[in-house]
Image (tube, rainbow, N blue to C red):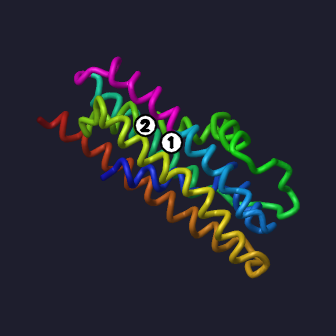
Amino acid sequence: MEIFIYAFAITYTPGPVNITSLIAGLNNYTKQSIKFCLGVSIAMFITFIILGYLGELFITPKLLPYISLIGSCYILYLSIKILKNTISFDKSNLTIKLNFWSGLIMQFLNPKNITAVIPITTIMFPTSNIIGIKILIVSLCISLFGGGAPLAYSIIGSIIKNKITNHHYFSLFNKMMGILLFISGIFMFYDFYKYIVN
């Protein structure tokens, strides 16, 4: 459960890829952004597969609770940063070509990609006993879900275009995602607490 709460919160918060897609939608480039979003999804999948199987090899059951503690602290810190973050975008600022390769490269270079994947593959996968073929299946699901985030931003941008003149709604959405991340961090901290108590 916490994997999907975390994945939703981290992939749907505004970041460089999502803001680029929002700007694309605001400028009527939603159709062109579909290949871009596919590139984003593939980059996430590759990152998940590499880190997921490395995590399976190197993370032992004895290390897991302590890695969970570090991960929960990191996610709580990240949620607070997101809650304090302000959103800004400029409709005339779309300088990237929206194709598969730009989505793939942008997502590989996006620090948010690693931020999203590391806690899932090193903490949540082992805790939930996601090993072997399950890593492939869950990685595929989360990557498709994650690739849907920039597409959703692009569609939202194309719908709202000039209707929203302030960033209040985006800030509110960002706060909601920050709260979801905070809840995810609390779940992880609780897992560590249960381990220590037992």
Nearer to me, 175 or 30: 30
For label 1, the SS is helix
Amino acid under disc 2:
Pro
Per the rendering, the mark at residue 119 is 2
Amino acid under disc 1:
Ala
Q: Which residue is painted at 83% across and 55% down in the image?
A: 94
Query: Residues at badges 2 and 1 in contact (C-beta under 8 Å)?
Result: yes
Where residue 159 sits: x, y (%)?
69, 76
Q: Which residue is painted at 83% across and 61% down in the image?
A: 90
Per the rendering, the mark at residue 116 is 1
Whether 140 is among the magenta residues is no
Q: Distance between the Cα atoms at labels 2 and 1?
A: 7 Å
Q: Up-down: is 137 above or below 165?
A: above
For label 2, the SS is helix
Residue 67, by quadrant, is top left
Q: Up-down: is 187 above or below 57?
A: below
Q: Which residue lies furthest to the top in this view?
A: 58
Q: Which residue is painted at 55% across and 63% down in the image?
A: 175
Whether 57 is among the magenta residues is yes
Drawn side of residue 96 relative to residue 73, left or right: right
Drawn side of residue 104 relative to residue 90, left or right: left
Q: What stretch is highlighted in magenta?
A: 45-62
Q: Quadrant of the C terminus?
A: top left
Per the rendering, the mark at residue 151 is none
How packed mark 2 is, by other alpha carbons closer than 10 Å (few <14, some 14-19, many 20 or more), is many
Where residue 28 sits: x, y (%)?
78, 68
